[in-house]
Each structure stands twice: as structure tokens, then as C-alpha cells.
Image (spheres, grey):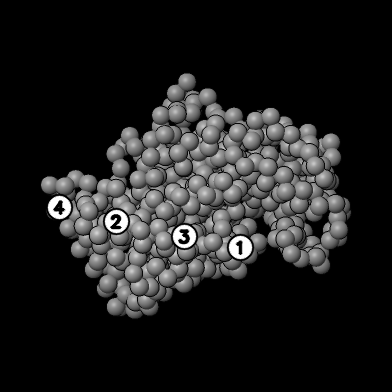
Amino acid sequence: MSQSESRTAPVSDATLAGMQHHADPLADKTIADILGDWPEGDVAADAPQWARIDTVNHLFGQWADNASLVGWTAQGKGVDAAMSKALNDYVQTAQVLPPWADAAKIERAEKLFMEHGALSCILLFCASLPECYVIPDLSSVLHTSGQLEQNAEYRIRSTAAMIFPVMMHGGMGERGAGVAQVLKVRLIHATIRNLILHGSPQSAVAQLLAGGAGHIAPQALPTQGGRQAMFQTLYARGWNLKGNGLPCNQEELAYTLLTFGYVFLRSLRRLGIGLRAKDEEAYLHAWNVVGHILGIERSLMVDTMDEAEALMARMQARGRAEPVTPDPRPALGQALMRTMEKALPWNIVKPFPQLMTRYLCGRATANDLGLTQPVPWSSALLFWGVLLVARAIDILVRWRLPRFSIVRTLTRILGYHFMSRVLMSQTRPLQLPTELLNQVDDVMHSWSDDPKAPRWLNRMEDKLTTHGSWSAGLAPNAQAARTAQAQQTT
């Protein structure tokens, strides 16, 4: 069965609205069976639910790759019969790819991701993540956990820890690790919903439909901190189910999926290095397969860029029509920009992330995230001057050299720098199994040169990223790899 045959017509406005009260029955049941019923009133720091969450997090470590999921059973300290059955059923059911998955399209998408290399990182930082925070209710959950304001790098690195295993060669196949990483994220979403709603989302919706108020009252925070602090904060925050829908609901999950697939492709277009229509559709297809493993309904997925543009516009309009007070989005946007600014060596280029985000995402998103502050005229002149001149040169030279692109090289340099500073640190490695972490590290090092660029452009890139302040943040092994690349090139 082909992907188009398995998909229904575009989702109606009424159905889209209903998705705010629809989540993920399989993952939600799994977590509900593990945690059981929460006690009435405030929850003590030694409540058994906290220990069960810790046990599940420990079991995650056994999901090293897709092969480890086959025949996996939950066992060990703290694992009772209910937890074992719930997790076993979840893993064996959720790991199966959809019947419409096209291996050839997935493989093509993987190659496209690898070909664009470090450029993918700048698009993640300056386009996908900023667009992800446009929906107020979605941002509200992140704001509660404090992940972006207090530790923006953690959120960025967590996102990368899913994207890389998924998009690396064979990531969704038997020898990859993408399915295993996505199943972890899916269960984390279900845990967040259970914590905020104090139980199963399906039960909360049933009570609302039966005439309940749909309001989860805030609770006093338990005194224990450490690794449980974020979970306890989510439990204590309170929630307006009637007004805000379910946290991490189907509409929000589908919107997030668009930021990783559609926004990436749209950004390439805006940089003047867009892909062929068939390649764009292959990339969207690969992320649709990821969405299926993540528990997103097929009716909320898109197959073409036109469909993606229309659906994203509708979702953003719906989100903007129901603002949250206080608005968490400016704080999230500023935290993301500060993380990138810290990675840049010279004051004149520190406004570049904000300028790039405005360019890739547009004025409306920049307004939502509070990215409208004036920047020094020298920085703006340099940014727009370099971008416009590079775009003009690309248009002229491509009459003779179709693969030529100064814009791609410049954005790769910036992306590799951010990747080196934020993702490749040996003191703060990505939260991945050791073998997989080594594979990701090798992939990142392989992106030191652009295979589509002329040799002289790669030499320029090597000199910019190997010497002086640009290389100051590289981990030792990354610095050694870059130096070796530069010596071989020159």
C-alpha cells in the first residue's frame, strides 16, 4: 500500500479542533498502568510514583538500538508485574513501522540529511526550534519545566539526540537506532501528560465530557529536588483542560513534526538551495514514518510542501488565536538566542542568530518570540550584505555550475560552529548509548567539508573553522579531525 493510498483527505477544521483533546492511547495506557492512581491532594516526595518513573528511565538505557527492542522484556530492580506487562506490550506494538513506509524514500531522505551536514544544525537552531515555540500551549509546558530558560542547551541537545539517530543511515531499519530513540520520546510525552493531568488523559477527557470542570488545581511542590524536580514541577503546575486541551496533544505533536520536516525544507528554499520536489516529498515521508512511531495519527501528516504550508498556517493561526497569559514564548526565544550568541566569537556576529531566525521564520514568528529588538547597524549591514551578495553570486554562477552555492558554504560554517560548541562537547556528551554516540560523533566530523562545493570553497571553510576563535570551542577530537582535514586539503 502506498503512502497516498493510506492517507485520507486533508483534516477538517472540526477534526483539527478535536485533536486538542486526543493524545496517544497506547503510550498513555502504558504510563497509567505503570504509575497507577495518584493520591488525592498534595503528593509527598517519597510517593511510589516517583520511584516508578526513575525505574522506567533506567530501563530506557536498555533500548540501545532497534535490534535491542526485538524480544525485549522489562526486568530488574523495581520492576513489578504491572510495569513489566505495560512496557513489554508497548515496545512490541509501537516498534512496528507502518505498512505504507517506503524504504527507498527513507533512504533518500537519510542521504539528503547527510549531504547537507552541518547546515542542518543551523536550520534546527534558527528555524525548526523557533517555529516549535510559536504555539502558546506547547510553549507553556516547556516554560513550566524551565528547560529553555534555565538550560537551553539541554533542550537543544535532547532534540539532537532524537534527530541524529533517526536520520543517520539505516536509522529506522533493523541495524539503526532511530526507532528506539523515538519510543523513548513518545513515552516521555505520555509521562508529561500523566503528571500534568494527575492521571490518564483519556480519563480526564471523559470526566470533562461528563460535565466536569476540566481544571487541574495547582499543588504544593514536594521538597525533594535533583533529577525528580522537573517531574514534580510538571505535576504541581495545574492545567485548564477545557481551555487548553491536553498537554502534548495530537495537534501539537503533528505541528512539531512539521517543524522538523517541512520547516527544514522551507528553510533550504529561502536560502536558495531548495531540493527537487521528489526529494522534498521523500524527506517529508521519512518524517511521517517517524511520526507514526511517535504516535501521531496519519490524518495529521502531509505528503507535499503545499499541504505542509497550508496545515502549518492553520495550526499557527489556531494557536495565536488562543494566547496564554503570561506569554511564555519571548522567554523561550531569548533563551535560545542567548545559547547561540555564546557560541559566537566576535561581538559583531552575535546578532546573527536573531537575524537568521527572522529571515528563515518570518516576521510573525519573530514577533511571537520577542525577536524584534534592534541590532547594531554594523551587524545588520554585515549579515544582510553577505547574504544578499552570496545569493546574487549563486544565481549567476549556477548558470555554469549548478551545484555551486556560497550561501550553503557560509551557513555550513556557522552550523558547524554551533554544532561544535553545543553538540560535540566531550564534557557534555549527547544522551545516547556509547556506541551510538560514537557513530554520531563520526558523522559530525565527516561534515567538515561540503561534498557539493568546489575545492577552493572547502579550503576557505577549513581556514575559517580551523584557525582562530572559530575553533576555540571544538572538543579535542573534533579539533584534531578539523586540523587533519585542513592539512590534507592544503
Q: Residues within 10 Å of mark 2 (few under 14, many from 20)?
A: few
Q: In the visual, does 190 lie left or right of 336?
A: right
Q: Are marks 4 and 1 in contact (CB under 8 Å)?
A: no
Q: Amino acid at mark 3?
A: Asn
Examine the rendered structure and indicate whether residue 151 appears above or below residue 379: above
The Cα atoms of the two marked residues, 4 and 3, are separated by: 36 Å
Q: Are marks 4 and 2 in contact (CB under 8 Å)?
A: no
Mark 4 = which residue?
397
- At x 59%, y 49%, the residue is 434
Mark 1 = which residue?
147
Q: Are marks 3 and 2 in contact (CB under 8 Å)?
A: no
Task: Determine the image quadrant of residue 467.
Answer: bottom left
Q: Of discs 4 and 1, which sits in the foreground? A: 4
Q: Amino acid at mark 1?
A: Gln
Q: Amino acid at mark 4?
A: Val
The reply to whether residue 309 is in sight is no
Q: Position of residue 24 (x, y in %)?
A: 65, 39
Q: In the visual, does 378 lie left or right of 88?
A: left
Mark 3 = which residue?
477
Mark 2 = which residue?
488
Q: Nearer the viewer, residue 475 or 274?
A: 475
Examine the rendered structure and indicate whether residue 138 appears above or below residue 65: below
- At x 38%, y 78%, the residue is 347
Q: Of discs 4 and 3, which sits in the foreground? A: 3
Of marks 3 and 1, which one's residue comes earlier in the chain? 1
Q: Of discs 2 and 1, which sits in the foreground? A: 2
Q: Nearer the viewer, residue 168 or 98?
A: 168
The Cα atoms of the two marked residues, 2 and 1, are separated by: 41 Å
The Cα atoms of the two marked residues, 3 and 1, are separated by: 28 Å
Of marks 4 and 2, which one's residue comes earlier in the chain? 4
Of marks 2 and 1, which one's residue comes earlier in the chain? 1
